[in-house]
Image (cartoon, helix red, strand yellow):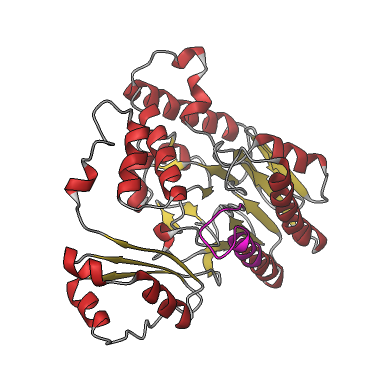
Amino acid sequence: MKIAHIADAHWGFGYPGPTPAARFEDITRTMDWAADRIIAEGCDLVLFAGDAFKDARVYIDRATAEIKAFTSWLRRLSDAGIEVIVISGTPSHDAISAYHLIREMQIPGVQVFTEQGIASSEEGPLVACLPGMNRSSFALQDDFAGLPPHEFHSKMTDWITDTCRELREGLAGPVILMSHLTYDLADTGFEDALLQNEPILTDEAARMFDLVCLGHIHRPQRAGSNVFYSGAPERHNFGDEHTEPGFWIHDTDTFTTLFASSEFIPTPARRFRTIDWCDMDIEAWLDGQVDDFAGIQDAIVRVRYSCSEELQKRFDRRSLEKALYDAGAYFVAEIRAEVERSERIRDAEVTEGLNPLTALAAWGSNQEIKEPEIVELQAMTTELMEGTI
């Protein structure tokens, strides 16, 4: 049988793009492509490993559009006679109430889990479902109250291992674990700093199962002997610029103890492109030596440059932006200097008396960082600060 493993769609609005809905449409287009490929491959079962949505707390009109997109995708598979097992992802992305609503729709062949449990399919293996969680999921429990960060983290990890053991106990035959967690042997790349206080799935826990299908980390990979991250089918920001989006298809002729093969299926996702310029590039631009901007067709583009104050005064960002669009860029996300301007950063607005989030906002404004990026940086800072309390 063939089992498709996909996660981290992150349907949502407000991504960098020509309109607030443009990237939502990109995600829908890519997910529909993935569904068509899953159907064409003759998959018997689909495992969706969490984070269908971008933000958990949204207005009802936006939530309605996002839930409609996800349920349409699920029905596309259901109508093709393919079973689907879904778990909720990280609480800051996936509102549990949205998953409850989808479950109440009773889409044929679709099972939805927001708590740990065992799912079974008509022809396939048992699937142990362990939905996503974060530090806040444990913070209100009496057992975790007052614990220092290292003990808190250790206790979370032990809870996950014990829960995996309970899920696996007493089940005959091969069992798949589907979860939305950080695996301790995974390649997390630039996300390391942000993941240091997250709940961890240990290799000990993973080895209790025949196959582990995970969501959460947007870097598709096989980690350890039996653990797979699907990554995200669509790129969402410049952190995904060099990541190949897609999903896995795990294949076996007869499901016994091991899979015969696992194939990664790349998706036609929107490309991101960063152009880094130095003084010489700026001078060439000012001298009329126009760059042909190869590789930016239909891409989301940003330009980062450093140059002297004199060159910066002569540099017209608007003319560069127009040239990028003329060369076929889908969206120019930013054109900004990467120069240290200590005099501006340390003006009276940024003082030691400010709290970290306010200081971050002031610093971002001085650096000409756009408001949505500042808000995202503040959210990341808040999560990191929670981990040190």
| Residue under the point 45% across and 17% down | 144
Location of residue 86 in the rendering, given as x and y in whole percent from the top left corner: 67, 46
| Residue under the point 59% across and 56% down | 6
Nearest to the observer: residue 114 or residue 237:
237
Location of residue 83 in the rendering, given as x and y in whole percent from the top left corner: 74, 54
Q: Quadrant of the N terminus?
A: bottom right
Vertical side of 204 occupied by 188: above or below: below
> Is residue 207 in view from this perspective?
no
Nearest to the observer: residue 371 or residue 246:
371
Vertical side of 203 occupied by 237: above or below: below
Give the quadrant of residue 87.
Answer: top right
Location of residue 370 in the rendering, given as x and y in whole percent from the top left corner: 42, 52
Indicate yes or no whether the magenta region holds residue 25: yes
Location of residue 119 in the rendering, given as x and y in whole percent from the top left corner: 69, 41
Vertical side of 308 occupied by 209: above or below: above
Q: Which residues are magenta?
A: 12-29
Indicate yes or no whether the magenta region holds residue 27: yes
Vertical side of 282 occupied by 135: above or below: above
* Side (left or right) of 278 relative to 109: left
| Residue under the point 23% across and 77% down | 281
